[in-house]
Amino acid sequence: MENELKRIIKNILFPKVKINQALLAEKLHKKTIVITGGSFGIGEQLCRQLSEINCQLVIVARTKEKLQQIQQELQNKPATIYIFSADLSDEVQLDQFIQYLQQYSVDIVINNAGKSICRPIMQSLDRFHDFQRTMQLNYFAPVKLCLALIPQLEKNKGHIINISAINVLLAPTAYWAAYQASKTAFDQWLRCAEAELLIEGIKISTAYLPLVKTRMIEPTAAYQHAPTMSRQQAVDHICQLIIEQRAYYKPWWTLLGQVSSVFFARNWVKLMQFYLKKKKC
Ligand SMILES: NC(=O)c1ccc[n+]([C@@H]2O[C@H](COP(=O)([O-])OP(=O)(O)OC[C@H]3O[C@@H](n4cnc5c(N)ncnc54)[C@H](OP(=O)(O)O)[C@@H]3O)[C@@H](O)[C@H]2O)c1
């Protein structure tokens, strides 16, 4: 009974989208797609899905063995898969990846690699590096990658797709300062750049995802029983953005949260204080 109720809630919160595979294949035929963070989670699932199409996938992440395993598993698929192992939060390795990409003619870049940290400020007093690391991967790396790829994207009338989180659209949440600030930073950057890039013929899309069942949310106890979107559903929404080239995807109910975030901002802070004090007792 409990499981059935969970299933119904999930279906209401995350209704399934049906992807037109033929249209997706047509859009991506012989295109070169860069996917950051393609070794696990949403990025891995996306690689598997796009491997069914005759295109070139360039995947980057840190875990070389996992990238090699994916490449080997998908070697008989229509897509050609290139892998590059790099820690994108390390500027030298990021530059090496950018250098490596110069041999391609990139059509789509999917900025998906990300790091999340959930930690109270009072436990972060000696952890300035948490804020540096999240900014490095979630903000500076995609900014530098986009800047480097803009000439190729301009030539190919390409597409930048950002994998973001609904949290950047809603009132901020306690414990998530490092992650939310860094995701919001890149979201703002891309929104500022949007009009400038659109006139150069480069499309911009953002997937504002809710909780997705990946290893990223595993360490957060509070999320263990929360309704989550599956990796495949997240990938379907990203594919839909590729097909329709819409500016964004966000779950239908995000608007309610956005309106509440404006009208009940102070109440939200009070509610969080109440919750945090109760937790301390
Ligand atoms: N899961 C959620 O609830 C959720 C919700 C909203 C938005 N998102 C966003 O979705 C994106 C994908 O997250 P996910 O849930 O799929 O998480 P995940 O399973 O942890 O995957 C993250 C990917 O990023 C790569 N990565 C992490 N640090 C990296 C680094 N320093 N350099 C290069 N690659 C790195 C990881 O590979 P390696 O470890 O091999 O480097 C992995 O492939 C993130 O941008 C996240 O912010 C997730």
Image (cartoon, grey):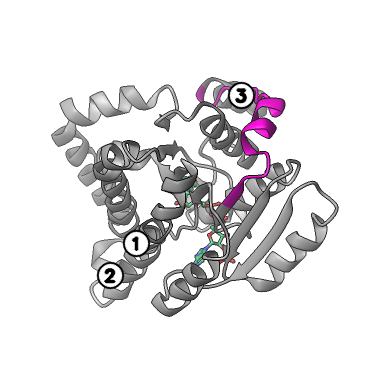
Q: Nearer the viewer, residue 213 or 104?
A: 104
Q: Amino acid at mark 2?
A: Ser
**Is-magenta flag for residue 211?**
no
**Position of residue 48 measured from the top left corner of the image (x, y, whole percent):** 71, 47
Q: Nearer the viewer, residue 53 or 277?
A: 53
Report the mark closest to the observer, 1 or 3: 3
Q: Is the residue under label 2 in contact with that under label 1 (CB below 8 Å)? A: yes
**Position of residue 89 measured from the top left corner of the image (x, y, whole percent):** 42, 71
Q: What's the distance in space between the residues labelled 1 and 2, CA to CA? A: 7 Å
Quadrant where the N terminus sits is top right
State whether residue 159 is above or below residue 97. Answer: above
**Position of residue 268 measured from the top left corner of the image (x, y, whole percent):** 21, 36
Q: Is residue 61 visible?
A: yes
| Image point (60%, 28%), residue name | 6
Q: Amino acid at mark 1?
A: Arg
- Which label number is shown at residue 254? none
Q: Which residue is mark 2?
A: 124
Report the mark closest to the observer, 2 or 3: 3
State whether residue 41 is above or below residue 22. Answer: below
Residue segment shown in magenta: 13-33
